[in-house]
Image: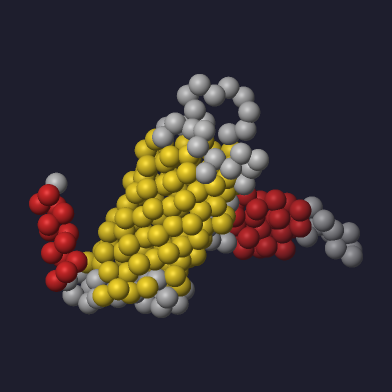
Amino acid sequence: MRYLIVALFTLVCFGSKAQMEKGNVYVSGTAAFVDLDGFTSRWSGGVQLDAMITDKWSIHYNILGGKRYFHMPLAPFGGVFVGLAIGSSTDSTGRRKVVPGILIGLLTAIIPEGIAYNIPVNDNLVLSPYVSPLEFEYITNNSQKGGTDSYAGGGVGLRSHFLLMNGKFRVSPFAEYKIHYAKNIHNGTLLGVHIGMRLNGD
């Protein structure tokens, strides 16, 4: 383990100049530890999509799964409801607005889970504070019977992007403070790491 840490440190310190540019898209594997008030702590794993929309701002989507736990963006649920509401309404001729319902539903469904501001520290390190107001989670305890187990929620956090090979790869440890939009907010933390690859560029 210590050899891996030394190798990563060497690559970060002496690697070539990093690229954090508009249009860059990263896909990452994720490992994370979920610790929310009222629930047993647990590990989860999944995937993240992170896209630079300017040289500073990026949007992200996360899917995570674990034992009695699932996390995804909230927007697809909104897209279904908005699309159905519009599609079931009628225009002035009495015809249902199916096509507008589908189009607006799809546009709503791709709203990102969160947005981040990327701050270059040096050629190979970028700090990325973020806010994720549109999260959806399913979580239960082993002993839980009945009651609510699905929640809309949000979080604020910080990622540290260690960029390797001119930004082609990156290792991004992160820490997030989370709540659920419910009477019991189940506040807690999500701690983990993304290991990603840039999909575009050399």
The quadrant in which residue 55 appears is: bottom left
The quadrant in which residue 17 appears is: bottom left
Query: Taking 121 as reference, is 91 left or right?
Result: right
- Residue 121 is situated, as x and y percent measured from the top left of the image, at 30, 73
- Residue 4 is situated, as x and y percent measured from the top left of the image, at 14, 52
Q: In this view, does 140 lie above or below 168?
A: above
Query: Taking 104 as reference, is 34 left or right?
Result: left
Residue 188 visible in image: yes
- Name which residue lies at 43% across and 64% down: 129
- Name which residue lies at 37% across and 48% down: 191
- Image quarter of the C terminus: bottom left
Q: How many marks?
A: 0
Q: Is residue 196 above or below residue 150?
A: below
* The residue positioned farthest toward the left in the image shown: 3
Q: Is residue 156 above or below residue 182?
A: below
Query: Taking 3 as reference, is 131 left or right?
Result: right
Residue 136 visible in image: no
- Residue 159 is situated, as x and y percent measured from the top left of the image, at 37, 60
The quadrant in which residue 34 appears is: top left
Q: Of residues 136 and 83, which is closer to you in this image? A: 136
- Name which residue lies at 65% across and 53% down: 78
- Residue 5 is situated, as x and y percent measured from the top left of the image, at 16, 54
Q: Of residues 105 and 192, which is closer to you in this image? A: 192
Q: Is residue 100 above or below residue 121?
A: above
- Name which residue lies at 18% across and 75% down: 16
Q: Of residues 32 and 104, which is closer to you in this image? A: 32
Q: Of residues 172 and 80, which is closer to you in this image? A: 172
